[in-house]
Amino acid sequence: MTSSTTNRWVIGVVGTVAATLLLAASASQQPAEGRSETAKGAAQVTLYNAEGDEVGRAKLKPAGGGGTRVQARITEAAPGFHGFHIHAIGECDPDAPDGPFTTAGGHFAPEGQAHGDHAGDLPSLLVLANGTASLEFVTDRFGVRDLRDDDGSAVMIHVGRDNFANIPERYVSTTSGQPGPDEATLATGDAGARYACGVVEGG
Ligand SMILES: [Cu+2]
Ligand SMILES: [Zn+2]
């Protein structure tokens, strides 16, 4: 055997071993991915507008460390940014006397902070010119299980933008007479009326 033949033989064996290890690794990963897709403790949300049309869906899955991965796909909304939150009550009544979906209460905030720091405050939804939106993120402010409290929870899309109560002191509220965010801003982020609502189910 010449040395070059030996080298080819060695490379051949190493290559075969490497390929076998790769196959074994991918085979052992596939069931794990399958399990995470159907992870226990995941929740689903179907969002409806006030006319009762489905306008999107969201999935909430445990993300480790007590956090939650949120995946939202919106199919029908006005282009631009929209306030997006978890609200405290799992009741989405489009005919509520105080306005569509006011039955869902305020922002999910078991510890009662101000807006921007509420557990249910989420990154804003950016709706494209074609009316669709896709948003995926992880929040460490609640676990999926926390949303299954006595009165449930809802996912809400607002008509307007969320300012996250970021009102500099150079602005004075005509309501409170005080500089910075007033009570309404500290509760809501001024995202306006409620466009679509979905009850958090399962999880
Ligand atoms: Cu909201
Ligand atoms: Zn809030």
Image: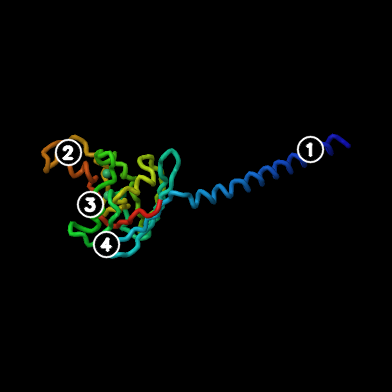
Count neighbours of disc 4 (C-alpha within 10 A) and say few if under 14, some if 14 to 19, many if 20 or more.
Answer: some
Q: Is mark 2 within 8 Å of ligand 2?
A: no
Give the Cα distance between marks 4 and 3.
15 Å
The mark nearer the N terminus, 4 or 3, is: 4
Instruction: Please name the residue that numbered disc 1 is placed on.
Output: 10
Q: Residues within 10 Å of mark 3 (few under 14, many from 20)?
A: some
Q: Nearer the viewer, mark 2 or mark 3?
A: 3
Q: Earlier in the sequence, mark 2 or mark 4?
A: 4
What is the number of the mark on residue 171?
2
Tag 4 residue: 50
Q: Secondary structure at mark 3?
A: loop
Which quadrant is the N terminus positioned in?
A: top right
Residue 37 seen by the camera: yes
Q: Which residue is mark 3?
A: 192
Kindly report the distance in space between the C-alpha atoms of the residues bearing marks 1 and 4: 69 Å
Q: Amino acid at mark 3?
A: Gly
Q: Residue at x 63, y 48 (%)?
A: 27
User: Does residue 132 appear in this view?
Assistant: no
**What percent of the width, then of the height, locates residue 112?**
25, 39
